[in-house]
Amino acid sequence: GAVVSQHPSWVICKSGTSVKIECRSLDFQATTMFWYRQFPKQSLMLMATSNEGSKATYEQGVEKDKFLINHASLTLSTLTVTSAHPEDSSFYICSARTLERGGELFFGEGSRLTVL
Amino acid sequence: GENVEQHPSTLSVQEGDSAVIKCTYSDSASNYFPWYKQELGKRPQLIIDIRSNVGEKKDQRIAVTLNKTAKHFSLHITETQPEDSAVYFCAARQQAGTALIFGKGTTLSVSS
């Protein structure tokens, strides 16, 4: 149990376009989802915390108008990278927390974004 | 906020040797310390975790120790195998509802 699915797994887009990444908890309800960004050979950096039905909380330095996060249901959170630029190219990973498993975090497969 | 430091950044060992990775954290309120293994291009996989009410935990070849007073915790892998080669991340968390804060990672290479 506790499967988190992320889609798409990889995406290539042109500079200036927007890209939406979905994160779904398949067999549990995720009251909280976290979005991380990982540049090559670097660590996972927390971007934002998203609670179902409320606005996301962004970490310092992360532009909320550029990285739109929606958590409309207990099983789905989306991250939209708006007006993407090459420097936004990265590995984006979501993680979901379930109360049923003592708060353990489960990670999605990750989405590799390449902006040309 | 929490800050997690991890050392070393790279570690090379011979098959069968032990490997130790160390992390320190800054926030004394942190109470949950997981370790993740990440292979290239894949999601992090939880390999072991420890909570602040425990000093040591072991699972086969993997063990984690925690020193709350010194605010550091370590991952110990014994009898390393080539398939242990990966990037390992430590992390810390204050409360069950907050995010994990990760260390910078350690690239472990096990040569046969």
Image (spheres, rainbow, N blue to C red):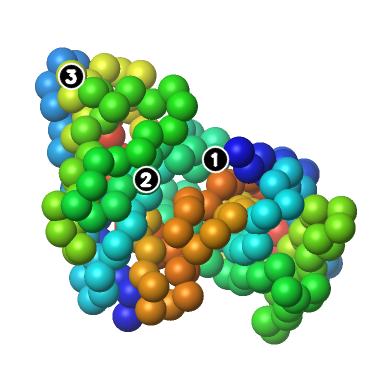
| Crowding near the residue tagged with mark 1, few <14, some 14–19, many ≥20 C-alpha atoms within 10 Å | some
User: For the residue labelled by badge 3, is the local secondary structure a helix, a strand or a loop?
Assistant: loop
Give the residue at the far right of this rendering.
Answer: B70
Question: In the rendered structure, which disc, 2 or 3, sits on the residue that comes first in sequence?
Answer: 2
User: Marks 2 and 3: which is nearer the front?
Assistant: 2
In the rendered image, which quarter is residue B64 located in?
bottom right
Q: Are marks 1 and 2 on the same chain?
A: yes
**Three-letter code for the amino acid on which mark 2 is drawn:** Thr
Residue at screen point 25% across, 23% down: A66
Quadrant where the N terminus of chain B sits is top right
- Is the residue B109 above or below the residue B52 in the image? above
Residue at screen point 73% across, 52% down: B28
The chain that hosts pointer 1 is: A
The chain that hosts pointer 3 is: A
User: For the residue labelled by badge 2, is the local secondary structure a helix, a strand or a loop?
Assistant: strand
User: Marks 1 and 2: which is nearer the front?
Assistant: 2
In the rendered image, which quarter is residue A17 located in?
top left
For the residue pair B95 and A109, the one nearer the viewer reads as B95
Left or right of B88 on screen, residue A59: left
Quadrant where the C terminus of chain B sits is bottom right
| Crowding near the residue tagged with mark 2, few <14, some 14–19, many ≥20 C-alpha atoms within 10 Å | many
Residue A22 drawn at (x, y percent)? 19, 49
For the residue pair B56 and B89, the one nearer the viewer reads as B56
Q: Which mark is residue A49?
A: 2
Query: Which residue position holds label 3?
Result: A83
User: For the residue labelled by badge 1, is the local secondary structure a helix, a strand or a loop?
Assistant: loop
Q: Are marks 1 and 3 on the same chain?
A: yes
